[in-house]
Image (spheres, rainbow, N blue to C red):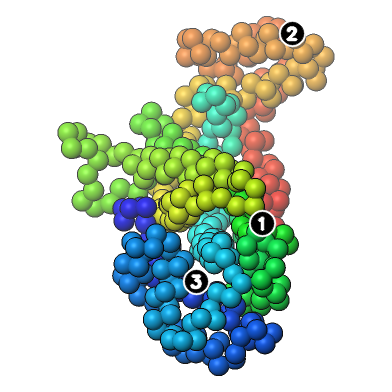
Amino acid sequence: MIPRYSREQMVALWEPESRFRIWFEIEAHACDAQAELGIIPKDAAKAVWERGNFNVDRIDEIEREVKHDVIAFLTSLAEYVGPEARFVHQGMTSSDVLDTCLNVQLTRAADILLEDIDELLTVLKRRAEEHKYDVCIGRSHGIHAEPVTFGLKMAQAYAEFKRNRDRLQSARKEIATCAISGAVGTFANIDPYVEEHVAKALGLEIEPVSTQVIPRDRHAMFFATLGVIASSIERLATEVRHLQRTEVLEAEEFFSKGQKGSSAMPHKRNPVLTENLTGLARLVRGYALPAMENVALWHERDISHSSVERMIGPDATVTLDFALARLTMVMDKLVIYPENMIKNMDKLGGLHNSQRVLLALTQAGVSREDSYRLVQRNAMKVWEEGADFAAELKADPEVSAKLSDAEIDDKFDMSYHTKHVDTIFKRVFAE
């Protein structure tokens, strides 16, 4: 988590001030519930809210001595609250505070990321509509295949990130749980009502069964979902990078006035933003594995997960937040070259219509094997000699015996490849 790849709102969520504020709210809400149950005086709960505060530097100072962050926090809190502080943390254990706080942070992080995805979806939908019928060559294995449209490329990306939004919404729901169950999760020293009260106050659900810690399969799923979203970012970034290659140049990142592409070569305009996104995606995916390894804790609790989560929690969410915002900016300003799309498609003399000719020959009574042989031998002349595909087909006596020139020309009608674009768009963008 470094400033270069960070945005303020997400960073603020993980600052010590924010973390300790959530700790305070957990403890104070728990005091309210304990007071309702008559376990602690109502005046004590009121004092916690009225006088309760903390000092980050003071907490750090105390922790250096006691070597325990929650105890350091409670000591700092007590210095503000006074004698009533003895009623704070009644029947609770550190994990009640730590785990519930982490889930609050991850839930709020998910809300920010959902907003990021919504902004990206808005841009992708607009670009899809703008280039709905701009025909370009589709590629399989990096080789010319058959025509698609640039709008369909954007529609595919939209559909993928829409699925990612649904996944993140589900992951948010799964991580939004609260555990205030005391040592080893049995509620022996604290009433389950306290957990219910705190959960409601913080917008969480109760954890049905905790073992002093909230089960880490929830966290594994959350970080795995972030990894999938990062993979989708890389998929779209890689598409842009390929389309920006000099030999292709069907689209490119916006190159601003005064921008420099190379310290050595003044002519360069490099896809640096999407290359950056590829690298950031690798990081976010990398955080998923340690989250999965955190699932297998010893018995009711150990803290082998703690150091991992203190790093991957902020790093994964901050990095993904930045990456989504950067991708949105790239796609918003992406420069599209429809004329280059046509030039590239025409480089292979109409070969993208080979399947249409193949199917026409089979419809004319030629076996599929012979149809393939006839089409391929003419196609190879285009590859090897730069011939015109339609002209070669017309000159081939075996082909012309089955298909007239007009029938061959009909198989080169571009509108054939775009006739179902509307259908696909309705499927993707139907509300």
User: Residue 384, image x and y in percent?
Assistant: 49, 9
- Kindly indicate whether the residue at mark 1 contacts the one at mark 2 (C-beta within 8 angstroms): no
Instruction: Determine whether 225 is above or below 173 in the image.
Output: above
The circle on residue 211 is 1
**Cβ atoms under marks 2 and 3 closer than 8 Å:** no
Give the mark toward the camera: 3 or 1. Answer: 1
> Disc 2 vs disc 3: which is toward the camera?
3
**The C terminus, quarter of image:** bottom right
**Relative to residue 212, is residue 266 drawn left or right?**
left
**Where residue 304 sits in the image (x, y, percent)?**
51, 47
Q: Name the residue under label 2.
A: 370
Instruction: Indicate the secondary structure of the residue bearing disc 3.
Output: helix
x and y percentages locating residue 165 in the rendered image: 61, 55
* Residue matched to label 3: 23
Compared to residue 355, the image places residue 285 above or below, namely: below
Query: Is 80 left or right of 91, judged from the image as shown?
Result: left
Q: Alpha-carbon neighbours of circle 3 within 10 Å: few (<14), some, or many (≥20)?
A: many
Crowding at mark 2 (Cα within 10 Å: few <14, some 14-19, many 20+): some
On the question of residue 171 being in view, the answer is: no
Outermost residue, right side: 365
- Mark 2 and mark 3 lie on one chain; the one further toward the N terminus is 3
The amino acid at mark 3 is: Trp
In the image, what residue type sits under mark 1?
Thr
Q: Nearer the viewer, residue 88 or 325?
A: 88
Q: Looking at the rendered structure, which numbered label has been put on residue 301?
A: none
- 19 relative to 364, above or below: below
Amino acid residing under circle 2: Asp
Q: Which residue is drawn at 64% across and 52% down?
A: 300
Which of 372/30 is in front? 30
The first of marks 2 and 1 along the sequence is: 1
Classify residue 74 by image quadrant.
bottom left
